[in-house]
Image: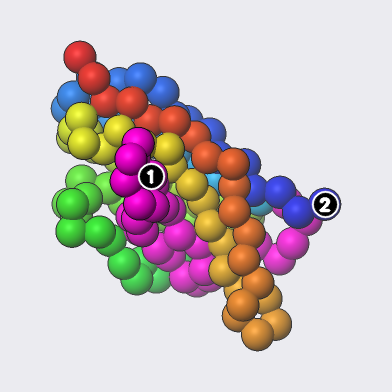
Amino acid sequence: QVQLVESGGELVQPGGSLRLSCTASGFAFSTYTVNWHRQAPGKERELVAAITSIGVTINYADSVKGRFTISRDNAKNTVYLQMNSLKPEDTAVYYCHAVGGRYGITRYWGQGTQVTVSS
């Protein structure tokens, strides 16, 4: 059974930090590119950061550059998103998205984890 499970989202004050985790099972996670997306209320889902199967970071949204860091531990089937200097506008549901497979078109999504930045 394929699963992507996000965790680590919670309420945090502006300026604070969080680390999100995305843990996979049921497929060859280590061969997949993994993206973090987020969706704020009333807004479209946006790509936040991406990392290839071998750990090369290939994209950060301009709004998070210098504050967020994506990384992965293939031995643990987990991708992380370290978020520092959080702002209220970072409030959103954060989703993990794995892309890969034989032709590079297989996609799996997690259920999302809520991050709320508020004082």
Image point (39%, 70%), residue name: 56
For residue 46, above or below residue 99: above
Q: Is residue 45 something that shows in the picture?
A: yes
Give how far across and how far down residue 90 sits, in percent: 26, 37
Disc 1 versus disc 2: nearer the observer: 1
39 in magenta = yes
> The magenta stretch spans which residues?
25-54
Residue 31 at least partly seen: no
Residue 62's x, y, as percent? 18, 58
Residue 102 in the image: state x and y as whole percent. Answer: 70, 82
Which of the two discs, 1 and 2, labels the residue nearer the N terminus?
A: 2
**39 above or below 55?**
above
Q: Is residue 74 above or below residue 17?
A: below
Amino acid type at mark 1: Gln
What secondary structure is found at the residue carrying circle 1? Answer: strand
Residue lying at the far top of the rendered structure: 119
Which numbered marker is on residue 1? Answer: 2
The residue at which mark 1 appears reads as 39
Q: Total number of numbered labels? A: 2
Q: Which mark is residue 56?
A: none
Left or right side of 1 for 112: left
